[in-house]
């Protein structure tokens, strides 16, 4: 008989398989490039009798150089190096061959427009394409084999949460968490509960919850704070055969959280963050040094102000800012909102707050991976709007934590910044945050970053 969830040993937080998948994706890309290069060199040798071709004829290496970057861009954009690459060979090969066929068409168009067709060995090009297509399929078999060795039968980490109901028959690989045993109560919409849930979920990318029907709404709201895909088991819906939803172990589920970014988008956003933050740190290094000296020389205390903020999945992290208040009066818990002409703010602090220079150390938070360049601004757990904790103002508040917080965001460029003296101040920026997480694109990030340059100096910074 299957043990009840209460008797199951409490597992540690699931460890994410994302880093292993990323290595496999990169390996797949490298294998594809080397395979294509080898196939075009082989085609050159078969048709022209030499791996280097003949005088006046671009050999296979030149043809590969024209085709490979186009294929890489189309394959990455088309999801050929996604999680589907690690499971079924047929599906993975289909996406790779589709991207390759598109790349061949684009390359032929470039050859036509450049009027260099007469310089090419057409037969070498054709044989190279056929050999490369076979090689790309072969690479999928190798990657699938390696994926099963590295990741097991399931390429992403899953977690099952039980809250007061018996669990169904579960796969052997799936850890089970007893919500009550770990003190996870979704009805408690506070930072402590959000942190406990995030710690229990760990690196899981797919979370399924079994709970009584009267707690579905509470779990629906709690799962929205996670960056993972969240589902709630709905066995009573089996007779309705819902057209929209999911299934888990042949039982219907209701998908209440999908995670705002898929894995490919998270890679793109992370690369964008690293490039922009490194470039900004180098370009702004004189300002960073001069500000650090000004803070140190004009008031005693540390140069940086470190405050606990809520990050992705509502996990706490320490956000960096240049210290703008007297050290003994610094508000580490964000219990007291900063006011105009606040006596705690130093002379230098007032200037760097008005010009947003105090926020620049958060570039290092971005490099660490705690923050993003663009995203909802991180809040302290004790932050309030008109003496009311943020999550008590609007029940949608936790949904903004499904993505990394940012140095700037959609709310900031729309002017929703500064102190939250009224509930409306929080609701306005919350609406912008939720719009951002549900409609993300890298182009929107670039637009918001550029728009931020217009609002660096503002009259609500004090």
Image (cartoon, rainbow, N blue to C red):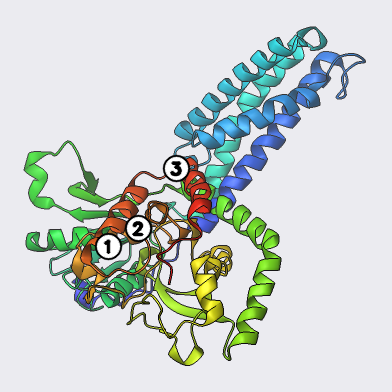
x, y percentage for residue 396?
Answer: 23, 59
Residue sitting at 14 percent across and 65 percent down?
A: 166
The answer for how far apart the CA atoms under marks 1 and 2 are is 7 Å
- Left-right relation of 268 to 339: right
Instruction: Report if residue 148 is visible in the image.
Output: no
**On the rendered image, what quadrant is the N terminus found in?**
bottom left
Quarter of the image where one finds residue 163: bottom left
Element under disc 2: loop
Seen from this angle, which residue lies furthest right?
55
Seen from this angle, which residue lies furthest front?
341
**Camera-side mark, 1 or 3:** 1
Sequence order check: which comes first, mark 1 or mark 3? 1
Q: In front: 230, or 311?
A: 311
Numbered tag placed on residue 441 in the rendering: 3
Quarter of the image where one finds residue 62: top right
Pointer 2 residue? 416
Residue sitting at 13 percent across and 66 percent down?
A: 165
Numbered tag placed on residue 285 in the rendering: none
The answer for how far apart the CA atoms under marks 3 and 2 are is 21 Å
């Amino acid at each position: 008989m299957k043990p009840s969830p209460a008797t199951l040993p409490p597992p540690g937080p699931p460890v994410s398989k994302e880093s292993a998948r990323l290595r496999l994706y990169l390996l797949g890309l490298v294998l594809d490039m080397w395979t294509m290069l080898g196939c075009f060199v082989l085609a050159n040798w078969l048709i022209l009798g030499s791996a280097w071709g003949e005088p006046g004829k671009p050999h296979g290496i030149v043809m590969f150089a024209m085709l490979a970057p186009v294929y890489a861009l189309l394959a990455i954009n088309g999801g050929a190096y996604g999680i589907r690459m690690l499971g079924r060979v047929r599906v993975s090969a289909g996406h790779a061959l589709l991207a390759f066929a598109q790349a061949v068409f684009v390359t032929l168009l470039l050859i036509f427009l450049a009027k260099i067709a007469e310089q090419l060995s057409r037969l070498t090009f054709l044989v190279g394409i056929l050999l490369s297509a076979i090689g790309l399929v072969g690479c999928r078999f190798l990657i699938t084999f390696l994926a099963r060795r590295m990741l097991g039968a399931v390429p992403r980490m899953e977690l099952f949460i039980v809250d007061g109901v018996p669990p169904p028959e579960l796969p052997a690989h799936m850890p089970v968490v007893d919500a009550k045993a770990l003190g996870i109560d979704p009805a408690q919409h506070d930072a402590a509960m959000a942190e406990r849930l995030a710690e229990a979920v760990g690196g899981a990318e797919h979370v399924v919850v079994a709970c009584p029907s009267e707690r579905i709404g509470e779990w629906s709201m709690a799962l929205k704070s996670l960056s993972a895909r969240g589902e709630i088991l709905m066995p009573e819906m089996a007779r309705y055969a819902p057209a929209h939803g999911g299934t888990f172990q042949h039982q219907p589920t209701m998908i209440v959280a999908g995670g705002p970014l898929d894995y490919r988008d998270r890679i793109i956003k992370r690369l964008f963050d690293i490039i922009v933050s490194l470039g900004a740190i180098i370009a702004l290094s004189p300002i960073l040094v001069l500000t650090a000296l000004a803070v140190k020389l004009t008031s005693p205390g540390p140069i940086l102000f470190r405050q606990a903020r809520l990050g992705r999945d509502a996990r706490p992290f320490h956000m960096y800012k240049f210290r703008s208040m007297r050290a003994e009066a610094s508000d580490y818990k964000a219990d007291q909102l900063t006011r105009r002409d606040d006596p705690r703010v130093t002379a230098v602090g007032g200037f760097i707050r008005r010009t947003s220079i105090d926020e620049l150390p958060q570039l290092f938070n971005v490099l660490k991976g705690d923050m993003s360049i663009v995203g909802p601004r991180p809040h302290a757990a004790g932050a309030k709007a008109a003496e009311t904790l943020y999550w008590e103002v609007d029940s949608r508040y936790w949904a903004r934590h499904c993505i990394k917080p940012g140095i700037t965001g959609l709310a900031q460029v729309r002017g929703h910044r500064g102190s939250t003296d009224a509930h409306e101040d929080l609701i306005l920026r919350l609406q912008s945050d939720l719009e951002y997480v549900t409609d993300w694109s890298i182009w929107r990030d670039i637009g918001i970053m550029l728009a931020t340059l217009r609002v660096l100096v503002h009259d609500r910074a004090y």
